[in-house]
Image (cartoon, helix red, strand yellow):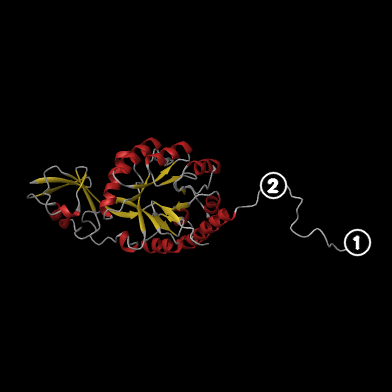
Amino acid sequence: MKNDNLIIAGKSYSSRLLVGTGKYKDFAETQAAVETSGAEIITIAIRRSNIGQNPYEPNLLDILPPSKYTLLPNTAGCYSAEDAVRTLRLARELLDGHSLVKLEVLGDAQSLYPNVVETLAAAKTLVAEGFQVMVYTSDDPIIARQLEDIGCVAIMPLASLIGTGMGILNPWNLQLILERVQVPVLVDAGVGTASDAAIAMELGCHGVLMNTAIAAARNPVLMASAMNQAVQAGRAAFLAGRMPKKLYSASPSSPTTGMIAKH
Amino acid sequence: MISIFINGMARDFEQPLSVNELVQKMSLGGKRIALERNGEIVPRSQFAQQLLLDGDKLEIVVAVGGG
C-alpha cells in the first residue's frame, strides 16, 4: 500500500499502532516490545522523581529516546482538569517544548471511566495554550464532536474500559463517531488481542492505542508483533472493502457448469 | 533555616538556595526532569536565577512507563 500514512496534527506516521510503555517487567522488555510493535508514537506517564534516594535510577527516555520516537506524554491518574493541565505543562517542559499530548481525565478509580466534563474543560485550556491534544474519551459521539470543535487533533474513544482486554463492546458507537468527526479517531483502551485491533481498523478507525494487551500477554514481544500485523491487516481490509454479509448465498465459489454426469 | 516541600516531603536547608543548587543536592543535575514551583513551571534556563523561599512547594517529575 502506497502512501497510506496516518496524519496527526499535520505530521505523517507510517504506523497506525500506538503503544504504551507501562506494566512491563523491566526496561529491556519495554524496549523490545515497543521496537517489535513498529509503533512510532509511544505514550509515557509523568511522575514524581526520586529526590536523591536513588541517584542511579535508569531513565525511560534513555531507552526510548525522543530522537527516535514521538513521545506522547499522558495524564493517566489525573481526576481533574487542573491536575491534567499541570501534568502536561510539566511534560512540555520535560520534553523541550514538545506539544503533542494525550489527555485523559478519569472519573472513577475502580473502572477508570473517563470524566468527560473535566476532559472537555482541560481540552479547552490545553488547546488555548498551544498543545496538540489527542484525547481519550468515552464512546459518546456527541462528546467526541465537542472535543473536535474545541480543537483536539485526535479523538480516542475507549473500546472497553482501560486494562480490561474486553475488546470492542460497542462498534456502533465507534461508527457514529467515525461518521461525525473529521480528525483521526483512534481506539484507545480495551483492546485485548489481535482480532480486537483488526476489528477496530476494519471499522475505519485511523489507529489503535494499546498498552496492557501487549504488556500483560504471556509473551509481550510476540504479542507486539501480532498487534503490528493485526493493525496492518485490519487497515488493508478496511481499504479493500469487505464483501457484504448475507444470510445465505445462491452464488457458490466454484463454477456451476461443467459438472460430471450421473453414471 | 528554610523549609521546602519537595514532592510532598519537607526538607530543611541551612541557608537560602537556588533551584539549581537544590537540584544538584538531590543528585538530579543534568537529568531529564521538569520542575514546578508553587504551581508554576520553572524552565530549566531559570534554575540558576530562581532563589527558593521558605515554604515553597516543588514538584519534580520524570518520564515513566505508562499507557
Residue A135 shown left or right of residue A82 in the figure: right
- Point 75% across, 55% down: residue: A252
Report if residue A129 is visible in the image: yes
Observer-nearest residue: A130 or A160? A130
Q: Is residue A27 left or right of residue A2?
A: left
Which chain letter goes with mark 2?
Answer: A
Question: Residue B35: x, y in percent?
Answer: 22, 50
Q: Residue at x 52, y 59 (%)?
A: A232
Residue A124: x percent and y percent?
A: 33, 39
Instruction: Give the numbered dot on residue A246.
Output: 2
Quadrant housing residue A53: bottom left
The image shows residue A222, relative to residue A196, as above or below, that is below
Q: Chain of mark 1?
A: A
- The image position of residue A257, as x and y in percent, is 82, 60
The CA distance from mark 2 to mark 1 is 32 Å
Number of the label disc, if any, that sits on residue A136: none
Task: Tell me which amino acid carries mark 1.
Answer: Lys
Tag 2 and tag 1 share a subunit: yes
